[in-house]
Every structure is written in structure tokens, then in C-alpha cells.
Amino acid sequence: MNWNPETLGFSIMGNFMETMPNQRALDAAKQLIDEMIARNYLSKDCYGFFGHRDKRETLCPGDLLYEHFKSWKNWHKECTVNIDDLINV
């Protein structure tokens, strides 16, 4: 399935298998999610947050960062949201 029309994503550049990104990078990612909610690109009531490795065979985003993401809001949350409802807000 081609996920790009149905998803939004961000990248934190680096190798996070054994080291974490700095706090500024993590804060920027959280701010980006908040901004996507504020602009109605994500539903504040329900959006799912997944790592790249959840959808493709890859080590991305790295073992340490993947474990850290598990503590973030909406990690692996499954939602039924019509994308047209978000676009027409």
C-alpha cells in the first residue's frame, strides 16, 4: 500500500541504534506534532504514531529512539478517521 497520501511523517537524522538524538531534536518533533494538530492535519481526538519500522522492513528510527517513542502520546494508537473530514475543516 502507498501510505504517503494517508500519512504525515517527520525524520530525525542520525543513527539512533546506540545513542539518542539531542533534546532539541526531540522537542522539535513534539512541536511539529502539536503544530500538525493545530493546523488540523492530525485529529486532536485520534491519531496514531508509529515508527518507520512498523510499516517497512528497516532498522529506522534505531533501537534507542524506537524505545523512547513508545512513551509518546498515541504510540500505536489505531483510529478510524476519514481524511476528507480533516481536509474540509
Image (spheres, grey):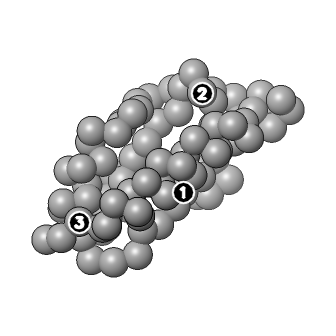
- Residue 28, labelled with which disc? none
Image quadrant where residue 77 sits: top left
Image quadrant where residue 16 sits: bottom left
Q: Which residue is labeled 3 in the image?
A: 20
Instruction: Measuring from the top left, give residue 31's x and y in whole percent.
Output: 54, 49
The quarter of the image holding the N terminus is bottom right
Mark nearer the N terminus (3 vs 2): 3
Contact, mark 3 vs mark 2 (Cβ under 8 Å) = no
- Residue 9, labelled with which disc? 1
Instruction: Measuring from the top left, give residue 12's x and y in whole percent.
Output: 42, 68
Nearer to us of marks 1 and 2 is 2
The quarter of the image holding the C terminus is top right
Q: Nearer the viewer, residue 31 or 82?
A: 31
Q: Which residue is labeled 2 in the image?
A: 44
Three-letter residue code for mark 1: Gly
Instruction: Measuring from the top left, give residue 66's x and y in whole percent.
Output: 25, 55
Mark nearer the N terminus (1 vs 2): 1
